[in-house]
Image (cartoon, rainbow, N blue to C red):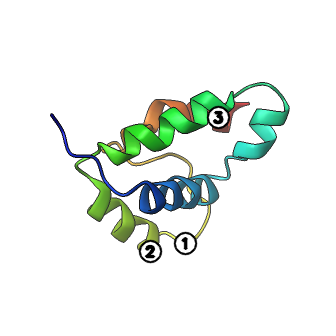
């Protein structure tokens, strides 16, 4: 059984990544491009990601709008999809 990370920390890592990528999570939900369940799944996947500490450091060193999520991000495919809509 994998021990998952703190839900609050990973919620904020997810929010932080959305800001750096210019992905509007709430807008995607309102436009029905992302469900609240999908959003919760993103946070849950983040909680199981082994790259969380590095993600936090990456976010601190990349304060501006990025064109793509890091390859190590467990939610990279979703971020790329959300940026495209």
Which residue bears the numbered disc 2? Answer: 60
Residue 80: image quadrant is top right
* C-alpha distance separating marks 1 and 2: 6 Å
Which residue bears the numbered disc 3? Answer: 82
Q: Which mark is residue 29?
A: none
Residues at badges 1 and 2 in contact (C-beta under 8 Å)?
yes
Residues at badges 2 and 3 in contact (C-beta under 8 Å)?
no
Locate residue 20, reporting x and y percent.
58, 60
Residue at the spot x=44%, y=37% of the render?
75
Q: Helix, strand, or loop for circle 2?
A: helix
As rendered, which of 36 and 18 lies closer to the eye?
A: 36
* C-alpha distance separating marks 2 and 3: 22 Å
Q: Residue furthest right?
A: 31
Locate residue 50, reporting x and y percent.
22, 49
Name above or below for residue 42 compared with residue 4.
above
Residue at the spot x=34%, y=42% of the render?
71
Residue at the spot x=18%, y=39% of the render?
2
Locate residue 33, reporting x and y percent.
74, 25
As rendered, which of 8 and 39 lies closer to the eye?
A: 8
Marks 3 and 1, the one that precedes in the sequence: 1
Query: How many discs mark residues in the rendered view?
Result: 3
Marks 2 and 3, the one that precedes in the sequence: 2
In the rendered view of the protein, which quadrant contains the C terminus?
top right
Left or right of residue 55: residue 29:
right
Locate residue 58, reporting x and y percent.
38, 65
In the rendered view of the protein, which quadrant contains the N terminus?
top left
Residue at the spot x=49%, y=38% of the render?
42
Name above or below for residue 83 compared with residue 66.
above
Which residue bears the numbered disc 1? Answer: 63
């Amino acid at each position: 059984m994998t021990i998952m990370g703190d839900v609050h920390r990973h919620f904020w890592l997810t929010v932080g990544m959305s800001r750096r990528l210019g992905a509007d999570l709430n807008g995607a939900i309102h436009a029905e491009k992302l469900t609240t369940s999908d959003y919760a799944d993103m946070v849950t996947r983040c909680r199981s990601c082994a790259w969380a500490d590095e993600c936090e450091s990456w976010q601190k060193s990349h304060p501006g709008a990025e064109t793509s999520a890091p390859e190590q991000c467990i939610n990279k495919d979703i971020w790329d999809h959300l940026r495209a809509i």
